[in-house]
Amino acid sequence: MSWLAISPDSHFSIANIPFGIITTSSDATKRPAIAIGDYALDLKAFASAGGFEDSPEIQKHATVWSKESLNAFAALGRPFHRLVREYLQSVFGADTKIPQVLKDNEQLKQAALFKRAEIRNHMPLVVGDYTDFYAGKNHAYNIGVLFRGPANALQPNYTHLPVAYHGRASSVVVSGTPIRRPWGQILKDPKAEPKVPVLSPCEKLDLELEMGMFICRENQLGNPIPIAEADDYVFGYVLMNDWSARDIQAWEYVPLGPFTAKNLGTTVSAWVVLADALEGSKTAGIANDNTLLPYLEEKTKENCLDIHLEVDLTTSNGDKSTISKSNSKHLLWSWPQMIAHHTITGCNLRPGDLLGSGTITGDTPGSEGSILEQTQGGKKAIQLRGGEERMFLQDGDTLTIRGWAGQEGALIGFGEVTGTIQPALPLF
Amino acid sequence: MSWLAISPDSHFSIANIPFGIITTSSDATKRPAIAIGDYALDLKAFASAGGFEDSPEIQKHATVWSKESLNAFAALGRPFHRLVREYLQSVFGADTKIPQVLKDNEQLKQAALFKRAEIRNHMPLVVGDYTDFYAGKNHAYNIGVLFRGPANALQPNYTHLPVAYHGRASSVVVSGTPIRRPWGQILKDPKAEPKVPVLSPCEKLDLELEMGMFICRENQLGNPIPIAEADDYVFGYVLMNDWSARDIQAWEYVPLGPFTAKNLGTTVSAWVVLADALEGSKTAGIANDNTLLPYLEEKTKENCLDIHLEVDLTTSNGDKSTISKSNSKHLLWSWPQMIAHHTITGCNLRPGDLLGSGTITGDTPGSEGSILEQTQGGKKAIQLRGGEERMFLQDGDTLTIRGWAGQEGALIGFGEVTGTIQPALPLF
């Protein structure tokens, strides 16, 4: 419990303490902050007023609070993140032993504690490389059926290694950034010969419900990360919407994978939930019957995050429908397994690198992580409140993903990741 | 001609003036330099001694010469690069009108002009995103035959759009960096059922002979770059070796493309040859019989760089064999076409982004850009000087790519890109 009034249904309970980058109307300098209840604590202002002086170890690294991204903080490693989170929990605790720091310090509250409605969020980290995995087995199967038929839906490698591809880092944007409907090459009639594409605005714009994970530690090129050490490389997690142009993807993706169909934008939530905050929210993922190669073997089956996920579609006239409910446990591979595989040939990870889980689809109708799956490839429209229906996203639609772990009063949530579809630009 | 003695066979004639990042034994600070003849001119030392004072326009941006990468210089745009190159050509010209700047300035020569053998090169730019195209049609066909048979060697999209995939930026390294033989998942017998991979050091380590191109200008997310403006986004070119683990690649690449088989290292040459330096070295690439969509149409067919390329393999006992001779004109797509396609769905490029051409294989035996092609998929060994032969790369092998345009006395060359294979590490 905190001395600060926090609603029991807040994603940002004192058990959470997620980190982000903010600006305010009075100060356009990007700076680190945490979310707590309906507030954001500006860590630059907090640190410069001596807020961390009761912890000499944190104080030693005070420069990280004046950076414009969380990369420097992330690079200090998990023991340091833990120290800062626990210190801030002690500052906000109802029985705080250091009330003079903030609780009884009206001046610092005025200077550093902002209503979240008054701040603006920015990308929490500068993304070095972005890798998107494909660990959502139900999704991979459903998409495989649509693209290649049931016999070849999952390739023989799928249960032996976490399939992934390199994504585009430059087009990763923070929640709230509008998404422009793209133009692209589309094969309107896949059965006609010869196959001649047209240039057209995307007609099959889709979402992908994913979790993202930011890396906090570097390994040297040529040196794989042992799976037992992989947890040390995890800074924290975000919700992610990997917008996808399905018609463009279907034509371009052979033989080297998706390219322009995916680099139109990938949206992440603004607040990074630290790895430590989710240590108590682990469960078993999708079972893998294979004997895994030792570099992918973990001591526990409880290696998957248990995070409830929901997707809302809000039409331009304001009607909101929840179109999917899923959970981040519907993955075949854990984050440590993804890290171990990513680096097995020696690939170097760096603080700020972003790994995506792949689309998370559950095992029941209504848990699909993409519209393509939910409409069975554009066959069965989604019925929305207000009477509209959707085969794919329309201009003006707003997609909102929410996610949280834990119980009321101590929720560890991500807030929302949202994006609104803007109409295609006139081309040139 | 220059007052500096430059050998007629130097890649770094006064017609070239390529840019890189260096350190010296007396100063470990990374800083910009140009290569000329057997020398490197330290631009930080040159600028701080007033070397650019005869050009007020260059002088205005003097801070770029104290950066540790060329990104800031690149971001100033092509007209600025042109100005600097022409100014430095006037400084080094035999009939220089400003001899007091360097020619007659022994003190500055001592401080800023280093024998290249005495300097160390570093990555010329910080790579934001790295995209690898697949524009070498002969290579794509040869590899397609090996992976999928002649009927499906080239996919229907191949001649309609420049196929590409997102590569790994963190593992792009400068010439001379050793390359560690990777471990990875390999399917030893692709015909056995069930398909069960093993973890093994790569047994099919290969090179890929490519050109690389660095971006110098930013476009906003959601705004495609018109092909007529694409040239303005080109900073310059490098040679590239996109090391590839063929056995790992064959198992992992479906359905999302290569991943760990390619993120073990990508080597680029140290000196970036400016786009302007190669304006006179254009020729027609591989003809494309398709009617292209307008966003890919160019005014000229002479849209391909005419750069002679060679690959040497040097064994650990020092025997050197030239195993391939090719030319960068063996591409189906030009750099402006790659830029136009990369951004058609709105992807934002940033200064420092690296685009690869894809492997460049000519149309005659001995012009293959990979060992996989030259050995016809591991069937016909390459005979080396000294009596050894190769199906794939062995530990201790050094690969060297050279490339140049122009004529003796005015060569516009890239120097070399080299890498030596180190044995696999013991795993964990």
Image: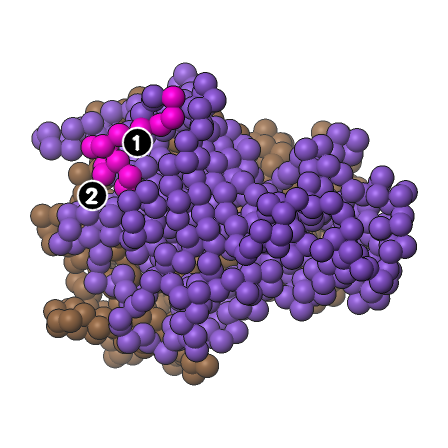
Chain colours: A brown, B purple
Give the x, y percent position of residue B10.
62, 45
Q: Indicate the quadrant where residue A78 lies.
A: top right
Which region of the structure is painted magenta? B373-386
Q: Identify the residue at image location x=90%, y=42%.
A: B107
Q: Identify the residue at image location x=15%, y=51%.
A: B150
Q: Identify the residue at image location x=54%, y=56%.
A: B406
Q: Identify the residue at image location x=74%, y=34%.
A: B24
Pick the front one: B5 or A406: B5
Q: Which residue is mark 1?
A: B382
B152 in relation to B31, above or below: below
Q: How many marks on residues? A: 2
Residue B13 is labelled as none
Q: Is residue A350 magenta?
A: no
Element under disc 2: helix
Label 1 environment density (alpha carbons within 10 Å; few <14, some 14–19, many ≥20): some
Look at discs 1 and 2 and give the one toward the viewer.
Answer: 1
Label 2 environment density (alpha carbons within 10 Å; few <14, some 14–19, many ≥20): some
Q: Is residue A2 left or right of residue B427?
A: right
Element under disc 1: strand
Pick the front one: B382 or A49: B382
Give the x, y percent position of residue B244.
36, 38
